[in-house]
Image (cartoon, helix red, strand yellow):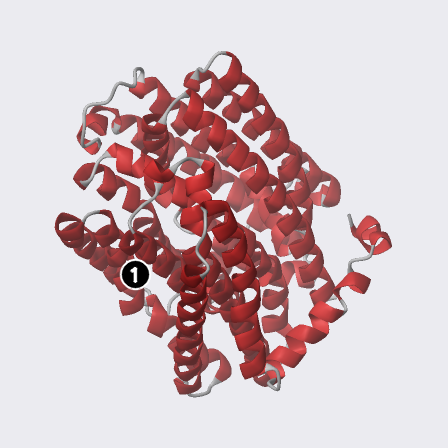
């Protein structure tokens, strides 16, 4: 049942992401040609500011979902009601805090833009961004029970529908009146309706959560919850700083136009990352269920499977990105929007090292190891800011991204697997690092071979894109298959992939939709 739930969540999540990606590229293209790259830079900057403000969340969502695994598995209605009551109150308070902090930043906006801008009404645009972020906090707490119950495919389907409607509306507005403020207002409208609809769906699936009740956690349960929350808060701070400060630092030290160009690369990388994260996010609840019920040996085996899948998927996409992202942007927007290769290398290295953490992150979150090394994320955040600023002054935009990679390698890269192997599997972590090195070498070899052949067969940009695409499909996958075809990990993954059509037939999907 766990595999079935995970596959169902992956199918709908990935399908929804494909729709979102297609619509996103259409909207981005219309956006650039109607409003210009400067507006795109402002959008990237304000999005990063609001990512920083999401620190107020304090990791509450992760703590909540983790806390729901056991009561859902045991059908403990009272405990679920108590947790949902706590979550509702906390998230409404969080929304108010984010709104107040966000408004207090208004006077400082000019200092975050390293150039004169021709964009008018910056304060109004920022306030609309802020309202878009805050509006979700009123209903979003009800998402958690659906996710913890291994049914986030429901959220994926609803999100896909509203993404289509929202993007169509934005395209019409951009082509007809070219008004960014109206576009942002439209985004807010559709986001409120979407979250309200998901909340209503949660009420239908779990009618006991809408019943008036006074269910509360015991003092012991509250103490345990807030202990985990405190550790998660530190992780949250680090994650937000590492992922949310790049555009702010680029805007200050390089310029808002560079943020706009980088945002095009980030759209492609972000689309792929979101696409891939659905695979791991879809199985998180199933792993949580496994942690509660299975042996250490079974947990270790599943971790090996996830880590292997992690490598193959992210390694393949890293090879594809190196070979295809520049030709694609040249065709899509023009050569003036293409970065130098050393910046592209920094972007892809950041993508790969972040992606290779997915298996470790999934197990860390589902095993509740929040308090182990809880101050390490603070070190990661400090390293990221300091190194990114130093390198930004020396080598520009690439330096900001190298700073992010360095902070990750100094902290998460080695400590998360160490803790998981020590406290969950009770095994030496050496095999993990040996495998990681092997995986990295294979990705580098695949990239060099594919790029070298692509250069030999270089023609015009369209033919080059097609030729490189074919090489990317063949070379890394063939190399990975030759090396790993006899391993347990490959055989297990292949057994699932080969039976996927039967497990996701139309009757099954209709039954579980």
Q: Is residue 26 above or below residue 217?
A: above
**Residue 502 placement, left or right of 68:** right
**Camera-side residue of 362 and 326:** 326
Q: Say few, some or many: other residues with alpha carbon within 10 Å of mark 1 (under 14 / 14 to 19 / 20 or more).
A: many
Residue that appears at 43% across and 24% down: 33
Residue that appears at 26% across and 33% down: 256
Q: Quadrant of residue 295?
A: bottom right
Can you identify the residue that label 1 sits on? Answer: 405
**Camera-side residue of 153 and 451:** 451
Count of numbered circles on the image: 1
Q: Position of residue 274 (x, y in %)?
A: 52, 50
Residue that appears at 44% across and 15% down: 179
Q: Is residue 195 above or below residue 470?
A: above
Q: Is residue 74 above or below residue 132?
A: below
Q: Secondary structure at mark 1?
A: helix
Q: Quadrant of residue 199?
A: top right
**Camera-side residue of 213 and 297:** 297
Q: Position of residue 7 (x, y in %)?
A: 69, 60
Residue that appears at 13% across and 52% down: 394
Quadrant of the snapshot with the N terminus: bottom right
Using the rendered image of the protein, determine whether residue 135 is visible from the camera's viewpoint.
Answer: no
Q: Position of residue 306 (x, y in %)?
A: 55, 71
Q: Position of residue 53 (x, y in %)?
A: 34, 39
């Amino acid at each position: 049942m766990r595999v079935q739930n995970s596959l169902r969540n992956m199918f709908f999540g990935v399908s929804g992401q494909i729709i979102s990606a297609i619509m996103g590229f259409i909207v981005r293209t219309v956006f650039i040609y109607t409003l210009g790259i400067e507006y795109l830079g402002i959008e990237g900057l304000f999005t990063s500011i609001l990512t920083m403000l999401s620190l107020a969340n304090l990791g509450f969502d992760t703590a909540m979902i983790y806390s729901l695994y056991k009561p859902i598995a045991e059908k403990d209605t009272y405990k679920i009601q108590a947790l949902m009551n706590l979550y509702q109150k906390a998230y409404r308070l969080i929304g108010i805090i984010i709104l107040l902090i966000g408004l207090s930043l208004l006077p400082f906006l000019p200092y975050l833009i390293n150039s004169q801008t021709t964009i008018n009404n910056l304060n109004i645009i920022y306030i609309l961004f802020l309202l878009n972020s805050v509006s979700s906090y009123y209903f979003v707490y009800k998402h958690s029970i659906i996710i913890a119950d291994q049914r986030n495919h429901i959220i994926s389907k609803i999100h896909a529908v509203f993404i289509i409607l929202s993007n169509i509306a934005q395209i019409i507005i951009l082509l007809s009146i070219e008004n960014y403020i109206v576009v942002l207002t439209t985004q807010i409208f559709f986001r409120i309706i979407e979250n309200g609809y998901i909340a209503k769906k949660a009420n239908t699936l779990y009618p006991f959560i809408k019943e008036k009740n006074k269910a509360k956690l015991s003092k012991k349960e509250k103490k345990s919850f807030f202990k985990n929350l405190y550790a998660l808060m530190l992780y949250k701070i680090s994650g937000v700083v590492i992922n949310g400060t790049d555009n702010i630092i680029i805007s200050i030290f390089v310029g808002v136009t560079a943020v706009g160009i980088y945002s095009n690369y980030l759209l492609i990388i972000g689309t792929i990352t979101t696409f891939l994260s659905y695979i791991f996010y879809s199985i998180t609840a199933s792993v949580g269920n496994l942690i509660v019920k299975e042996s250490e040996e079974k947990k270790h085996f599943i971790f090996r499977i996830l880590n292997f899948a992690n490598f193959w998927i992210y390694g393949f996409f890293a090879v594809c990105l190196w070979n295809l992202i520049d030709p694609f942007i040249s065709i899509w927007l023009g050569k003036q929007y293409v970065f130098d290769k050393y910046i592209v290398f920094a972007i892809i290295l950041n993508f790969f090292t972040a992606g290779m953490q997915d298996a470790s992150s999934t197990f860390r979150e589902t095993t509740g190891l929040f308090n182990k090394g809880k101050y390490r994320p603070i070190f990661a955040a400090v390293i990221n800011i300091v190194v990114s600023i130093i390198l930004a002054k020396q080598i520009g935009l690439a330096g900001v991204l190298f700073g992010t990679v360095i902070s990750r390698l100094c902290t998460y890269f080695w400590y998360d697997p160490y803790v998981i192997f020590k406290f969950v599997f009770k095994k030496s972590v050496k095999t993990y690092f040996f495998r990681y090195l092997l995986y990295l070498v294979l990705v580098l070899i695949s990239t060099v071979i594919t790029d070298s052949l692509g250069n030999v067969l270089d023609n015009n940009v369209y033919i080059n894109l097609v030729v490189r695409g074919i090489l990317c499909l063949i070379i890394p996958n063939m190399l990975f298959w030759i090396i790993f075809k006899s391993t347990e990990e490959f055989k297990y993954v292949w057994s699932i992939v080969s039976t996927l059509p039967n497990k996701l037939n139309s009757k099954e999907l209709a039954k579980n939709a």
